[in-house]
Amino acid sequence: MFESVFTQTFVDWEIVVSDDETPSGEAWSFLNSLARADARIRAIKNDGPHGAVSNHNLALRASCGEWIKPLHDDDVLKPNCLEVVARIVSQDLATDNEESASGSNVPVCDLIEPAPVPAV
């Protein structure tokens, strides 16, 4: 997931990742190392295990961006995903109709890679 954001053609992104108090400190250590390496990444820690919805809300409240693209741990974005979405949204806002989004000829589902299926 992180690597697919790092390689985006649209570089004005922010990652806000929230740790819902994972049992081992490894996840928090990893998230902090990412945040120290890139100012566009912010790692925050929930004050206890509150579940997915509370954890997502914490990250949403901490974000600074104008637009939000939620990502989950198994999401992989195609390299131009954020650029295409930003262009479609900008066109749609400029024309104030749905035709600009549909006229882009880029289905949003084509911008996200399918999650790898773990071997059983």
Image (tube, rainbow, N blue to C red):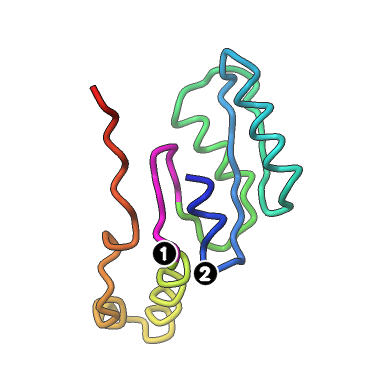
The residue to which callout 1 is attached is 81
Magenta residues, dominant SS class: loop
Question: Residue 13's image quarter?
Answer: bottom right
Percent of width and height locating residue 70: 45, 48
Estimate how packed mark 2 is, as few (under 14), some (14 to 19) or many (20 or more) residues with alpha carbons within 10 Å.
some
- Range of residues picked out in magenta: 70-79
- Residue at position x 44%, y 31% in the image: 53
Q: Which mark is residue 8?
A: none
Q: Nearer the viewer, residue 55 or 16?
A: 16
- Residue at position x 39%, y 45% in the image: 75
Q: Secondary structure at mark 2?
A: loop
In-image side of 116 versus 34 (left or right): left
Q: Is residue 56 above or below residue 40?
A: above
Q: What amino acid is found at the position of numbered circle 2 in the picture?
A: Thr
Q: Is residue 10 above or below residue 120?
A: below
Percent of width and height locating residue 49: 54, 18
Q: Nearer the viewer, residue 52 or 27?
A: 27
Q: Tell whether position 82 is magenta.
A: no
- Residue at position x 71%, y 34% in the image: 32
Q: Nearer the viewer, residue 95 or 7?
A: 7
Percent of width and height locating residue 91: 40, 82
Structural distance between the alpha carbons of marks 2 and 1: 8 Å
Say which label, 2 or 1, has the lower sequence index: 2
